Image: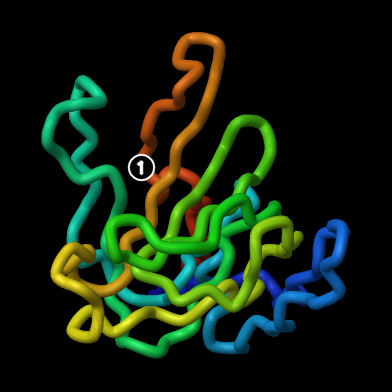
Amino acid sequence: MGITVLPAPPAPARATPHPSPGSASAGPAGGVPADDRGHRGRRGHRRPVPGAVVRAVDIPDRPWEQGHRGVDLAAAPGDPVRASAAGTVVFAGSVAGTPVVSVDHGGGLRTTYEPVVADVRRGDVVTRGAVIGRLADAAALPPTARRGPGLSWGARIRDPASPDGRYIDPMSLLGRPTVRLWA
């Protein structure tokens, strides 16, 4: 008897510009590599990088308390970082010296990726799997920048009970792979 995990077939991925006054440039196109098919979830999200979890989420009970509001995934500087699901880029810039990209997926859900040097701009519409940037080299960032391993991927959802948003484990956005037993 054996176990086979069957990934979903690849879907095209791309970034397209969101029309804005005086803006004529588009985000770069990015296909989903064949070896990355298994990282998509049934809930419409996929891992932004294929690496293993290096540090799990540790969301505090109160927003001001110490914790880890994202999951760190193994990745090397220069690796492409992909949107976990379709949405609109709402931030591409620097926070305390750390390059950050945030994507609004609608329904109050926003995902954030850091440290990521953006290949997209605010207002760009991205599809699931579109390259949104490249992992920054932490050694080249200023002392105020995030120093964790790999990619930090976070998710926050806004709802009537928490209008400022509450952090959730982004791994909960991923579906489980299809598992088939065979003999």
The foreground one among 51 and 18 is 18
Residue 10 drawn above or below residue 128 = below
Type of the residue with mark 1 = Asp
The answer to whether residue 60 shows anywhere in this view is yes
In the image, 50: left or right of 42? Answer: left
Q: Which residue is mark 1?
A: 169
Residue 20 drawn above or below residue 163 = below
- Residue 84: x and y in percent read 56, 60
Disc count in the image? 1
- Residue 28: x and y in percent read 71, 82
Residue at horizontal 49 percent and vertical 52 percent from the top: 174
The answer to whether residue 178 shows anywhere in this view is no
- Which quarter of the rendered picture does the N terminus lie within? bottom left
In the image, 158: left or right of 145? Answer: right
Name the secondary structure under disc 1: loop
The foreground one among 80 and 99 is 99
Residue 99 in which image quadrant: bottom left
- Disc 1 crowd rating (10 Å Cα; few below 14, some 14-19, many 20+) is some
Residue 89 in which image quadrant: bottom right
Residue at horizontal 71 percent and vertical 75 percent from the top: 9
